[in-house]
Image (spheres, rainbow, N blue to C red):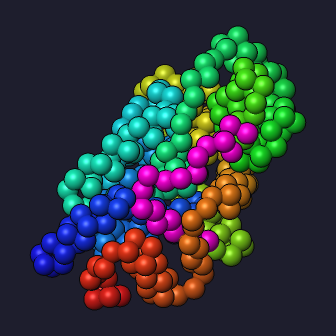
Amino acid sequence: MENNASERERDYEGASKRKQPLLVLIGPTAVGKTRTSLDIAKAWNAEIISGDSMQVYRGMDIGTAKLPLEEREGIPHHLIDICDPDYSYSVADFQTEAVKCIEEIASRGKLPFIVGGTGLYVESVCYQYQFAEIGSDESFRREMEQFAREHGAEALHDRLRAIDPPAAERLHPNDQRRVIRALEVYHLTGQTFSEQQAGQLKESPYELCIIGLTLDRQELYRRIEQRVDLMMEQGLVAEVERLMKEHNLPPGTVSMQGLGYKEIVDYLQGECSLNAAVERLKRDTRRFAKRQLSWFRHMKDIQWIDMGENFHNNLTSIHDIIAGKLQVNLEYTSNQSL
C-alpha cells in the first residue's frame, strides 16, 4: 500500500507539469454520489471537496443529507460545516475557497476531488469563472422581496422567466435570493445572467475529469421519496426548529430557502399541514433534480455513467475513465475490495 501511495504521488506530480488534475463527480440529488465518491476517493488517494451550496452550513445536517463524520471512512472532506446558517454564502465564496482547497490537497500529493450537485458552484471552479463587480441596488431588492411576499415565489419566478428563460429553468422558485439577484443583474446592466454566463471562457486551468451519474427517472424519483421519508424519521422538523431558534433566523434567510428547510419553515409557521409540507418537499425535490440535470446537460466534458446497472461494473467503468482522462497510470487497489 505504501508503494502504491508513493506511485500515486509521483504520477500526480508528473501530471501537474501539464495541468493540475481535478476529478469531479456530479449528478442529481439521490443518484448515489456519496457512496460512489467514497469508493473513488479510496482508490485514487483523493480528498473530497463538497460542491453542495447548503452543506457549508453548520447544523444543517438532515435536510442536506450530510454524511456524518464517522461514515466518511477516514477520507478528508472539505467545505462542509464552514459557516453559520445566518451567513449568505455565495458562489464567489465557494470558488475562492475551493481553489484554495485544490492547491492545498495537491501540495500533499493527493488528488483533488469535487463532489456535488450545485451546478454553478462546480462549474465556476472547473472553468475559473470571472465574477464581475456588478454592484447592487438595495431598493430594487426590497421591492422584489415585497413583491414575493404579496404575490408569492412563483410570481417572482415568472418575472425572471419573462426576461431570462434559461436562468428561470435552472433556478427553483424557492431560491428567492438567486432569483432576485438574476433580476437585479438585468436591472443594473440590461444583460441577462444567462448572457453573462455564456460569455465566460469555458477553458479550464485544470486537467479535468468530470463524471456524471444518471439514473432512470422513475427510479430516481423513488429514491427521492425514500430520502425525504428518512429525513422526516431522522428529525428534520426538530432540526429546522432548533436552527431558527438558536440563530434567530428570519424565514427569508438564504439557508432557510434550501430544499427541506423552506417547506418545514412554512409548516412551523402554520402556513400548511405537516403532510402537505412533506408532499411539497417531495415534489420540489423531484423538480430540483430535473433542474440539476438540465444544468449538467449544458456543461461540457462530462462522461456519463448510468447508475441503474451493476455497481461493480459502474466502478470499473469510472476507474477506466479516470485513468484515461487524467492520463495518470495508477495501480489502484479497488479491485481487491470489489
Check the picture and name the quadrant holding the C terminus: bottom left
Q: Residue furthest right?
A: 162
Q: Residue 131: horizontal and vertical position, in percent?
A: 55, 33
Q: Residue 278 vs residue 116: left or right? A: right
Is residue 258 something one can see in this rendering?
Answer: yes
Where residue 235 sits: x, y (%)?
49, 49
Locate the N terminus and report the quarter of the image it occupies: bottom left
Nearest the viewer among 145 and 323 is 323
Viewer-proximal residue, 168 or 225? 168
Task: Please tell me which residue is depicted at 65% across the width and 34% down the height of the picture.
Answer: 178
In this picture, is 314 found above or below 236?
A: below
Residue 112 in which image quadrant:
bottom left
Q: How many numbered discs, if any?
A: 0
- Image quarter of residue 141: top right
Q: Residue at x 62, y 27 (%)?
A: 252
Q: Nearer the viewer, residue 143 or 327?
A: 327
Residue that lies at the very extreme toward the front in this rendered image: 18
Give the residue at x 45% y 40%. Answer: 94
- Relative image position of residue 153 (x, y in whole percent): 77, 33
Among all residues in the image, which is located at the extreme left?
2
- Reply yes or no: does residue 203 show up in magenta: yes
Q: Magenta residues? A: 195-214
Query: In the picture shown, does residue 95 fall above or below 215?
Result: above
Can residue 34 be spotted in the picture? no
Looking at the image, residue 130 sits to the left or right of residue 93; the answer is right
Q: Is residue 236 magenta?
A: no
Residue at image position (84%, 34%) is 163
